[in-house]
């Protein structure tokens, strides 16, 4: 596929400059406490970019961001992207262990953080993630846990010898790079340059770093503005995103709004009461994100009392937008990190995994992708490990297309791999098992996804305790929460012994048979 012409050079820097010229007075990002127009986002991110250049950030520098949704994340992302840095947004769900892993996988050079992330005291959290920080003095970092990390910048003053205050909103300084240098640097950022690494769970015990270029991000997000204008009708499009900015859905939101005047509404932590207040105040026209949150909104006691008439689809449509005009109970495929959040400029093929041959329309098969809309690859993986000989990435998703030739949508039918899809998030069974198997109380564990009407799937753990008589599920949940993001912690626990765990002829666990046995309810005891 030849990449489509989107009307401007597809880099994030060119996109924000164009947006500022063409619709600069329109609000770009709005929360209950913040408001930035496109012109303000352009001006402020340019100033931050000049400050970054003066401090050694440039093409290819690996910049980690540990922020919640909001203006600081947006402006820092724009600034680093404008000068060609490779941005790695880190999940605010991360435990210290998970952040340490992501910093190591990403070979991050500079980590930029606020003083607080929701309830997390970041200066206290970071030494838990990086124990060598506790005794580290001033100067460049030298940490065995994250060997490439040299700097930690905090957006508020922090009294730690390893922290450097980097004020996003400081007045220009004499040693900042000048506007001419910034312009020259921006001219050397190309659509082919890597822009963002999105971390996602996979079939391995560690997260995968999906590398997306400027061109992929800006082309794949083109469809977002069109959808928002269609949903808004005659009103100015303003949508509340509940997708975290550190996942591809959040990137889709903030980059998609650079194509046309579309206001992104966001909250540091989406909660129904605050969400309804923001939608009502700003006359929001749509909610994008997890269907479970839309269900929470509709179930809230204040929902009938709020004037949410501007958000027509919130009142009338299905909770899950992927269920709009679909055949039966099968959702439209939401896309994936590896395709930049959409299929706009992606070659797709649906094959029979057993034969490798394409399947007819209406028949389920495995989804393959390649082309301008596909990722560059995974961090620290060779190309042959990720793509087949013809350049196709095998997603592991089972999909089908309508028999109607005019319907190009893909419909999601499940997974051919072990990956768990829970409330829109990917969970690797092996990652959870690696944590559980470290617990002194557990001899062995197997993790699977079980069907759930609200979350699609829930994470379930089948464990072989060392001492069944002293097993305490509550204590295991607490230990799991200390090591895993909340959405990865098993919601259901089952007790087993090794002799009852189903195995494949290869000796590996038979997870499908295990899930079937649990559904039958006769083999394993569910722990309260």
Image (spheres, grey):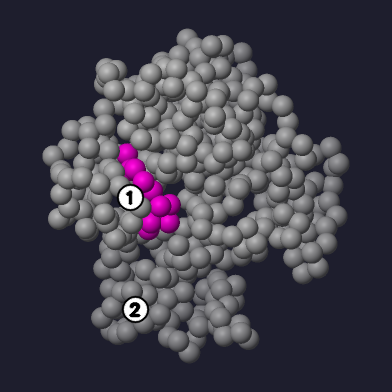
Q: Is residue 249 left or right of residue 176?
A: right
**Above or below, 503 relative to 77:** below
Q: How many marks?
A: 2
**Quick check: 76 left or right of 60?**
left
Give the residue number, with chain letter if any, for mark 1: 149
- Element type at mark 1: loop
The single residue placed furthest to the bottom in the displayed view is 499
Q: Is residue 349 above or below residue 256?
A: below
Return the x and y of residue 17 as percentages of the image width and height. 52, 18
- Does residue 23 appear to the left or right of 476 in the view shown? right
- Please state if 141 lies on the left or on the right of 276 as rendered: left
At horizontal 54% and vertical 41% (from top left) the residue drawn is 194
Which residue carries the number 2 mark? 442
Question: Image quadrant for the N terminus?
Answer: top right
Q: Residue at x 29, y 78 (%)?
A: 441
User: In the image, which is nearer the foreground, mark 2 or mark 1?
Assistant: 1
Where the C terminus falls, by quadrant?
bottom left
102 in magenta:
yes
* Magenta span includes 193: no
The residue carrying pointer 1 sits among few (fewer than 14), some (14 to 19) or many (20 or more) residues within 10 Å by Cα, namely many
Identified at 25% across, 46% down, the residue is 140
Q: Which badge, 2 or 1, is on the more N-terminal residue?
A: 1
Mark number for residue 357? none
Does residue 496 appear in this view? yes
Q: Give x and y (percent) for residue 234.
A: 61, 13
Element class at badge 2: strand
Residue 240 in view, yes or no: no
Bounds of the magenta segment: 100-112
Asked if residue 132 is positioned above or below residue 448 in the image, the reply reads: above
Using the image as rendered, state which of residue 513 and residue 10 is in the foreground. Answer: 10
- Mark 2 residue crowding within 10 angstroms, few (<14) / some (14–19) / many (20+): some
Nearer to me, 111 or 149: 149
């Amino acid at each position: 596929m030849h990449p489509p012409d989107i009307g401007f050079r597809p880099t994030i820097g060119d996109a924000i400059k164009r947006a500022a010229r063409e619709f600069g007075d329109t609000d770009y990002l709005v929360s209950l406490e913040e408001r930035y127009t496109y012109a303000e986002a352009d001006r402020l991110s340019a100033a931050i970019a000049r400050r970054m250049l003066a401090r050694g950030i440039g093409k290819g520098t690996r910049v980690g961001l540990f922020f919640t949704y909001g203006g600081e994340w947006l402006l820092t992302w724009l600034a680093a992207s404008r000068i060609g840095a490779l941005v790695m947004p880190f999940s605010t769900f991360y435990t210290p262990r998970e952040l340490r892993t992501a910093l190591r996988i990403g070979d991050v050079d500079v980590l930029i953080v606020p003083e607080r992330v929701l309830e997390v005291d970041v200066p206290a959290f970071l030494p838990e993630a990086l124990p060598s920080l506790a005794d580290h003095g001033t100067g460049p970092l030298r940490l065995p846990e994250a060997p490439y990390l040299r700097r930690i910048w905090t957006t508020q003053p922090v009294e730690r010898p390893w922290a450097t205050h980097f004020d996003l909103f400081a007045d220009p300084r004499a040693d900042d790079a000048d506007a001419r240098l910034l312009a020259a640097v921006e001219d050397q950022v190309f659509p082919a340059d890597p822009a963002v690494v999105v971390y996602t769970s996979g079939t391995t015990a560690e997260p995968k770093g999906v590398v997306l270029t400027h061109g992929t991000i800006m082309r794949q997000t083109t469809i977002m503005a069109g959808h928002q204008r269609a949903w808004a009708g005659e009103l100015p499009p303003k949508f509340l995103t509940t997708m975290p900015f550190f996942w591809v859905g959040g990137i889709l939101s903030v980059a998609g709004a650079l194509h046309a005047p579309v206001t992104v509404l966001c909250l540091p932590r989406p909660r129904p009461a605050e969400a309804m207040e923001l939608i009502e105040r700003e006359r929001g026209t749509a909610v994008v994100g997890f269907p479970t949150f839309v269900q929470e909104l509709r179930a809230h006691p204040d929902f009938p009392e709020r004037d949410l008439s501007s958000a027509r689809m919130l009142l009338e449509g299905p909770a899950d937008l992927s269920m709009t005009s679909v055949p039966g109970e099968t959702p439209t495929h939401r896309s994936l990190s590896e395709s930049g959040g959409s299929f706009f400029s992606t070659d797709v093929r649906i094959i029979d995994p057993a034969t490798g041959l394409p399947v007819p329309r209406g028949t389920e098969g495995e989804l393959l992708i390649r082309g301008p809309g596909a990722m560059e690859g995974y961090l620290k993986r060779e190309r042959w490990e990720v793509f087949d000989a013809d350049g196709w990435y095998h997603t592991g998703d089972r999909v089908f297309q309508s028999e109607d030739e005019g319907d190009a949508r893909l419909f999601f039918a499940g997974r051919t791999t072990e990956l768990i899809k829970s409330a829109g998030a990917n969970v690797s069974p092996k990652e959870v098992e690696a944590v559980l198997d470290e617990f002194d109380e557990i001899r062995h564990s197997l993790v699977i996804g079980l069907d759930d009407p609200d979350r699609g799937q829930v994470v379930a753990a089948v464990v072989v305790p060392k001492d069944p008589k002293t097993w305490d599920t509550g204590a295991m949940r607490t230990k799991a929460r200390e090591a895993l993001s909340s959405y990865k912690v098993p919601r259901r626990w089952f007790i087993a012994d090794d002799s009852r765990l189903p195995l494949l002829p290869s000796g590996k666990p038979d997870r499908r048979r295990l899930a079937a046995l649990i559904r039958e309810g006769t083999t394993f005891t569910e722990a309260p």
